Image (cartoon, rainbow, N blue to C red):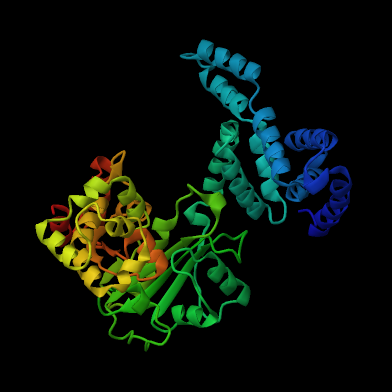
Amino acid sequence: MMAPGLVSRSLSKVREIVASAAGRNGEPTEKQLERIRRQLRECAESRGGEVSTRLRAGRLADTYLKLDEAGRHAFLRIIALEFGPDPKRVAKAHEAYQAAVGTPRQWDAEALLRAAMRSSRIRILTQFNAIPQGVKFLVDLRADLLRFLEHDKELKSLDRELDARLTAWFDVGFLELARVTWNSPAALLEKIVQYEAVHEIRSWKDLKNRLGSDRRCYAFFHPRMPQEPLIFVEVALLDDLADNVQKLLDENAPAADTERANTAIFYSISATQDGLRGVSFGNFLLKRVVDDLQRDFPRIKTFATLSPIPGLVRWAAKNTKEVLTAFNENDWKRLAAAGIEGPDSPRLAQVLSGDPTWAEDAALARALRDPLLRATAAYLLEAKRDKLPLDSVARFHLGNGARVERLNWLADSSEKGLGQSWGVMVNYLYDPDRIVDNVEAFVDAGSIDAAAGVKRLARR
């Protein structure tokens, strides 16, 4: 095994080389790009043995990190376009395989064809993986790659291979589940604050409340990234379904009695690494957490979420006519009394577009409640693309076998909550007796399990 100090000293030297060879703002010169090509070829060919190869991979990684956006893009294009399989070798191996089909030579010919199809890109990625902090480097590199891929489709081949590598390296069997507590290392707690993606953590007091005696926080970690949570879930232990996130996060509310808790509410799930997009382990996290909670709190029988509906207002803005079908004659009468005169009212247009100021008017909020809940139910149960729900959070939970249990009016009165879903939140219920059937129906036919009350709302 190579001594870490060798890589560190090598990386220090290459920083000086890069600083002098690079153009302004870190953009590589043609001379440096040619040097990168040469180093990549040497890395792909594993010249000089294991130690030399890892040193070379370390130098390349450090070079990459010193480049600006244009330089990193150029670096990735070189790997993607110049280190794929050799077309002539593939054609020759394929011809030999076709000739060998049905003969004793078929299996040897198949192995040679597989070898010909294996690109040098994989060898380079594997070498990066072997250096200190290599796993994190590749995760961050893929985050860059995904950003560039939006405008440069020629990087797709590299993304496919890197995605396949990361999926294998981050298989759930390699991940470790750990509970995060107030006594966890400060660096880890700072990461939880930084990565929280659903409900912003506003202060250390806020964080401490989320890690209190009636709360739990669990995270998945990779052994090569021990202080980097990959995904984490925050849980509240209650005696009923939660219907308001502000109450749930109230720092001054007394802690619930965990001896009486019969319900676990998953109120925030945050994936932390952009480079692991498409690598799915959220469903395994929930299953592991449920097992952990059942062991520690046998009284808990109900497992549900209090979830945002992030795509609702965006959908409403594009489907105004469909939203307005949720309004009936009685709704229009109540809205008229609250100052909204008919479907062409500018004020109604502001409400539907996510303007949060309407929530300050209690009479208007009461008048909007029923029609907007009906529109929300229709969105969750009927708005789909390729048989799957439009809403990303709905896709996640329904794909894991949950049921749409209840809609909660003004459950998130924050500006963000009002702007993305008119403050509506949803409880997804995980019923162990129905999860398998729900998953099968969802995968096979796009069928969505929902409580009778939600279905009635969707029928308007």
Residue lying furthest top:
99
**Percent of width and height locating residue 270:** 47, 62
Considering the image in quadrants, where does the C terminus appear? bottom left
Q: Nearer the viewer, residue 369 or 247?
A: 369
The answer to whether residue 424 is visible is: yes
Residue at point 73%, 50% (across, down): 65
Q: Nearer the viewer, residue 299 or 34?
A: 34
213 versus 391 height, above or below: below
384 vs 103, left or right, is left
The answer to whether residue 287 is visible is: no
Occupied quadrant, residue 306: bottom left
**Percent of width and height locating residue 457:** 16, 58
Occupied quadrant, residue 420: bottom left
Residue at point 35%, 71% (across, down): 413
Residue at point 56%, 47% (across, down): 166
**Percent of width and height locating residue 423:** 32, 66
**Percent of width and height locating residue 100:** 52, 13
355 vs 429, left or right, is right
Total marks placed: 0
Residue lying furthest left:
329
198 versus 396 height, above or below: below
Residue at point 48%, 63% (across, down): 197
Q: Nearer the viewer, residue 452 or 353?
A: 353
